[in-house]
């Protein structure tokens, strides 16, 4: 096994059969300067901030920390699912702070000054301030109505309704919004939330007239993750929501955004990645299925511009995706794969979880309780860093959701007794 003996400092040995790339993986527990991470304090004070900054710099881009003005307006609220749930629709609005808008601009005439995101929430009817519900927060692809009702228009799996009744009956709330509300999924940065943060020229040192993110600034995944955090702000203000048990989940590109959101925002209690593949849970260095070259040519706007520079030279990336999952530690994380979803590299997703494990263990909790991908007859690894694989292709099925809820029951304690 392994090319372990001649590895440069800071590289993890990975058995050749698993990863046919010489050079191993960057070790989550060795700092960039070669210093080993031996204690939780080393992790929290040095290594974790360094890794987070490296993902910003090289993969997703830096999320601006400037303020926006946020508003919330309830559009509808009432019983649903035969009275078992409360259904709430809220419009969140984000604006550039007035002080940041150039005097020459008339805000109402400039669409880029306000972004509206419609959040749909189903809460168990019994949820209350004394018995708040844990909530799954997941962005959707095709609109909140499709989450509720599906779509008759085509059979694309992203058109399937979500198992809201099953989740509510298990004690979970579900909150969702269409990802396109936050940032339209096109290579254009004049819409969505990015322009709210562009340099206005009002602050000394800013260059006015910015229209695209700079080399190391956030792309669309960064914006979707930012939006997840803003929806979390909103959910935490609702006393029926258990603020300490909001689980961020997502499928595919939205699974990438979910893990990045949990890495950036430690208020998320748990992260679920479904078929997230390249730029998600799958190791980039494997180059199996979707590669950095493939993803950055089709979706250049998802990442910071610098990420495309690693196309065909993944070994030069200072990070790999096991380290992204490690940024969720010690919170529970759950990675789900589908056997036929080869574009997302199921084995690479499993290995992403496996090589995040040492960080969980350093922090005193269980990592992934498997060293080999699970077999079809025992497809679930139920550990705190968990995993499953199911037959079939790229989709987030009712069965996947049931397993996410099993993992949350196990690791976040289910619905509280009152
Ligand atoms: C694919 C893309 C994947 C994945 C997927 C999706 O076209 O190559 O990275 O994100 O889209 O989001 O459905």
Image (cartoon, rainbow, N blue to C red):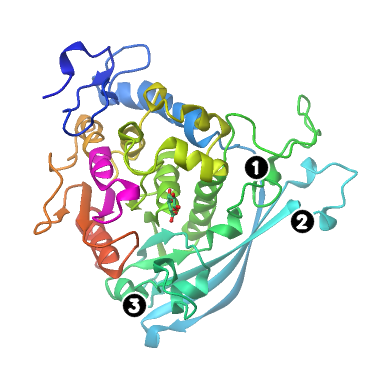
| Other residues around mark 2 within 10 Å, as few (<14) / some (14–19) / many (≥20) | few
Which part of the image, by quadrant, shows the C terminus? bottom left
For the residues labelled 1 and 3, the Cα–Cα distance comes to 37 Å
Residue 197 versus residue 382 in the image, above or below: above
Q: Residue at x 27, y 53 (%)?
A: 336
User: Disc 1, disc 3: CB below 8 Å?
Assistant: no
Tell me which segment is drawn in magenta: 332-353
Q: Position of residue 145 (x, y in %)?
A: 51, 75
Q: Position of residue 310 (x, y in %)?
A: 46, 28
| Other residues around mark 1 within 10 Å, as few (<14) / some (14–19) / many (≥20) | few
Residue 373 versus residue 57 in the image, above or below: below
Q: Earlier in the sequence, mark 2 or mark 3?
A: 2
Residue occupied by mark 1: 67
Residue occupied by mark 2: 111
Where residue 165 is drawn, which disc sits there? Answer: 3
Label 2: state its secondary structure. helix
Which part of the image, by quadrant, shows the N terminus? top left
User: Disc 2, disc 3: CB below 8 Å?
Assistant: no
Q: Earlier in the sequence, mark 2 or mark 1?
A: 1
Residue 306 versus residue 245 in the image, above or below: above
Indicate left or right for 276 with 102 as reference.
left
Q: Nearer the viewer, residue 411 or 349?
A: 349
| Other residues around mark 3 within 10 Å, as few (<14) / some (14–19) / many (≥20) | many
Label 1: state its secondary structure. loop
Pointer 1 residue Cβ closer than 8 Å to ligand 1: no
Q: Of circles 1 and 3, which is in front? A: 3
Q: Is residue 378 visible?
A: yes
Q: Position of residue 50 (x, y in %)?
A: 42, 23
């Amino acid at each position: 096994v392994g090319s372990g003996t001649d590895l440069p400092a800071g590289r993890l040995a990975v058995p050749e059969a698993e990863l046919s790339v010489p050079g191993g993986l960057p070790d989550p527990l060795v700092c960039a300067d070669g210093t080993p991470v031996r204690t939780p304090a080393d992790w929290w004070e040095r290594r974790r901030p360094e890794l987070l900054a490296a993902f910003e710099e090289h993969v997703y881009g830096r999320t601006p920390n400037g303020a926006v003005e946020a508003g919330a307006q309830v559009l509808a609220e009432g019983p649903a699912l035969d009275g078992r749930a409360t259904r709430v629709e809220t419009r969140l609005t984000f604006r550039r702070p007035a002080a940041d808008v150039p005097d020459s601009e008339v805000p109402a005439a400039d669409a880029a000054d306000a972004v509206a995101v419609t959040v749909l929430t189903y809460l168990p009817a019994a949820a209350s301030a004394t018995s708040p519900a844990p909530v799954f927060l997941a962005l959707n692809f095709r609109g909140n109505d499709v989450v509720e009702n599906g779509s008759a228009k085509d059979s694309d799996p992203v058109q399937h309704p979500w198992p809201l009744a099953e989740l509510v009956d298990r004690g979970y709330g579900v909150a969702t919004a269409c990802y396109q509300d936050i940032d339209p999924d096109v290579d254009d940065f004049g819409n969505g939330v990015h322009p709210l943060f562009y340099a206005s020229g009002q602050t000394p040192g800013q260059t006015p007239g910015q229209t695209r993110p700079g080399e190391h600034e956030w792309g669309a995944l960064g914006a979707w993750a930012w939006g997840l955090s803003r929806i979390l702000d909103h959910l935490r203000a609702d006393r029926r929501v258990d603020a300490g048990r909001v689980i961020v989940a997502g499928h595919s590109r939205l699974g990438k955004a979910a893990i990045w959101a949990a890495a950036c925002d430690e208020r998320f209690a748990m992260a679920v990645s479904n078929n997230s593949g390249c730029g998600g849970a799958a190791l980039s260095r494997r180059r199996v299925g979707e590669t950095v070259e493939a993803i950055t040519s089709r979706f250049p706007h998802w990442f910071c511009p610098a990420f495309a520079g690693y196309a065909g030279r993944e070994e030069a990336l200072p990070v790999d995706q096991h380290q992204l999952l490690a940024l969720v530690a010690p919170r529970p994380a759950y990675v789900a794969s589908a056997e036929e979803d080869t574009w997302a590299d199921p084995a690479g997703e499993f290995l992403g979880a496996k090589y995040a494990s040492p960080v969980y263990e350093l922090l005193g909790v269980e990592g992934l309780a498997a060293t080999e991908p699970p077999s079809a007859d025992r497809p679930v690894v139920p550990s705190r860093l968990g995993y499953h694989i199911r037959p079939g292709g790229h989709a987030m099925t009712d069965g996947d959701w049931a397993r996410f809820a099993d993992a949350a029951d196990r690791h976040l304690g289910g619905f509280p007794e009152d």
